[in-house]
Image: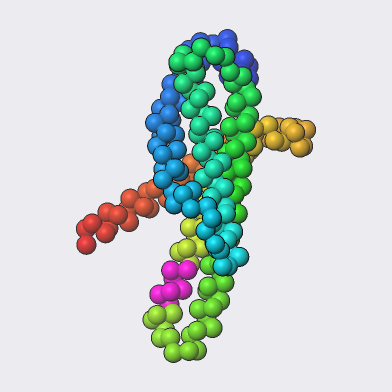
Amino acid sequence: MLIGFNNEESEIKFSIYQQIYICRRLFRLGKSLQTILNILEKQQLQNPKKKYNQIPHTVNEMSTYSTYIFYFFFHLLENIMVIHQMGFFEKKFNHKLLKIVSHTFWTLGLITQLVYYLNRLRTAFRREQELKSQIQNGMTNGEFLAQLKQFSKERYQYVLLILRIIGDMACAMQKSQIPEKILHTRFNRGLVACGGLLSSSIQIYLQAAKIYKKQNVSEV
């Protein structure tokens, strides 16, 4: 809330806050456009008739394909609202409805992404069990420990990504009004804030780890 008003009322009554709100979304416009271009370049969208031989692989491909589609429409609607607020469209849009629809696509994208990483996590556990059974088939202790360490890193990263998605879902579901439709109530603001903090913290950690890894590789 802003000075006793909810976000919608503050956007109407406080022009300064409204301009800041538009500028904040404007900074995201370039990133959203780049995301749309990246999605269109994905091979999964260019070859949707690919045959699948294994159920886990099918789940991964279908969830990835669905995530791209949902995120595409989410960013598309977000960009339409930003451009309209800048005055490029004379036609009036129902921003409240577009916001609900766009964040519904975001929620669906997060759900399909969650399915993808849960399946990858399950596969990692299965591969580890298979690895433990192979130690009796001539695998040395060094090879076993190296692969076991690699699987542990993969599981750790998948868990972080799953937690990040759960944090984002609190915000996405709140803005898409899903709790109001299903539970007839809204999420606590503290819960949404904690979800956003969790997601942001994990994303910063993952980006920092990625940069640190690249720096180490370049120094070798």
User: Does residue 195 appear in this view?
Assistant: no
Q: Nearer the viewer, residue 142 or 88?
A: 88
Please determine whether, in this image, residue 12 is positioned above or below residue 139: above
Residue 82 location, x and y as percent? 48, 23
Q: Residue lying furthest front in this view?
A: 49
Q: Nearer the viewer, residue 124 or 185?
A: 124
* Horizontal relation, residue 145 to residue 161: left or right: left
Q: Quadrant of the C terminus?
A: bottom left
Quarter holding residue 27: top left
Q: Nearer the viewer, residue 80 or 44?
A: 44
Q: Specify whether residue 107 is painted magenta.
A: no
**Residue at the (54%, 11%) spot, across then down:** 14
Residue 98 location, x and y as percent? 60, 26
**Residue at the (59%, 21%) spot, across then down:** 95
Residue 35 location, x and y as percent? 43, 39
User: Does residue 182 appear in this view?
Assistant: yes
Read off the magenta span: 145-151
